[in-house]
Amino acid sequence: MIKSAPAGQNDAPEMRKVYASFVTKQIAAGSSIIALEADLMSSMAMDSVARAWPQQVINCGIMEANVIGIAAGLSLTGRKPFVHTFTAFASRRCFDQLFMALDYARNNVKVIASDAGITACHNGGTHMSFEDMGIVRGLAHSVVLEVTDAVMFDDLLHQLIDLDGFYWVRTIRKQAPAVYAPGSTFTIGKGNVLRDGDDITLIANGIMVTEALEAARQLEQEGISAAVIDMFTLKPVDRMLIKNYADKTGRIVTCENHSIHNGLGSAVAEVLVETCPVPMRRVGVKERYGQVGTQAFLQQEYGLTAQDIVLAARELL
């Protein structure tokens, strides 16, 4: 069940606190969860959880490939490992371990990849991943998610504890604008239509969902009816929803805090070319590496604002 948050409401907790709270409650309830960190306890609000539950929260140090191997081994004992590290390290640094220890071996591990895209902000280019979802979506059995806000993150985490397999959950660490009302539930593999429209469809995920909603409001002032879809599951992507809105509006703009190559834009284009070819534009990072800056500056610098979406829509219209 999907409910929109009241307009202007943004008293949501930080995403890292949602994760720490989830782990705490699972341990207290006697779950077989075990949380693994790569020397980023304070970054993910896990310090106090580790002090309270030292046998179920393990800091494995700055050895991300080793963390994945440990998680795979623990899953074979019946534990439910959740691994957290920054998105860049969870993907680029240990891709072979993701392939061998998790996907190929079909182990039950959930990877929480934080500081998605430009939200790495002051950590700069080395910590700023624009390619991670493309890396992971290429694995045969992976499920790739990018959460939108705290309500979605909490609901998906509670689903994942009981789901078997390798799940990649891309998130920011700090506060996300509230999109969904408390109590909303989500279906993995199904996109959410946040706003209907007839002239063009904006398909977004992560921090770009609120930008797409703002772009739709601006387009409405110009007499343009824009649908907005939150495609929080990149793999398996909701093919039917994409096709239906391509048929309905005849134009698509994808919006992602990721490279335009092999991410949301590519996934949508694959569906369109096979089922309903229509004109489309991809708003995302174009052949760039990251840099240090505030999120507001970086969104302007990399063309990830509502205005960039509006300009892409105008090109199609």
Image (tube, grey):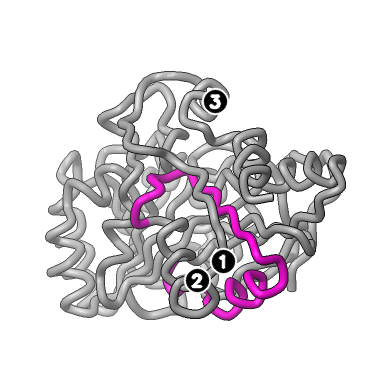
Quarter residue 43 falls in: top left
Give the alpha-carbon distance from disc 2 to disc 3, as whole Å.
29 Å
Q: Is residue 59 left or right of residue 11?
A: left
Say which of 178 and 133 sits in front: 133
| Sequence-earlier tag: 2 or 3 | 2
Question: What amino acid type is highlighted by mark number 3?
Answer: Gln
Say which residue appears at 32% left-offset and 71% top-offset.
142
Question: What amino acid type is highlighted by mark number 1?
Answer: Val
Give the alpha-carbon distance from disc 3 to disc 1, as whole Å.
28 Å
Say which residue appears at 59% left-offset and 76% top-offset.
243
Q: Quadrant of the N terminus?
A: bottom right
Please report contact status of discs 2 and 1: CB closer than 8 Å, yes or no.
Answer: yes
Identify the disc placed on residue 278: 1
Dot 1: element: loop
Q: Is residue 271 left or right of residue 222?
A: left
Q: Is residue 103 left or right of residue 194?
A: left
Dot 2: element: helix
Q: Is residue 26 visible?
A: yes
Question: Which residue does the numbered mark 2 point to in the structure image?
Answer: 272
Foreground tag (2 vs 3) = 2
Residue 182 position, x and y percent, is: 75, 58
Say which residue appears at 67% left-offset and 40% top-offset.
310
Say which of 182 and 60 sits in front: 182
Residue 300 position, x and y percent, is: 54, 25
As for residue 288 lying within the magenta part, the answer is no
Question: What amino acid type is highlighted by mark number 2?
Answer: Leu
- The magenta region covers 234-262
Q: Is residue 20 visible?
A: no
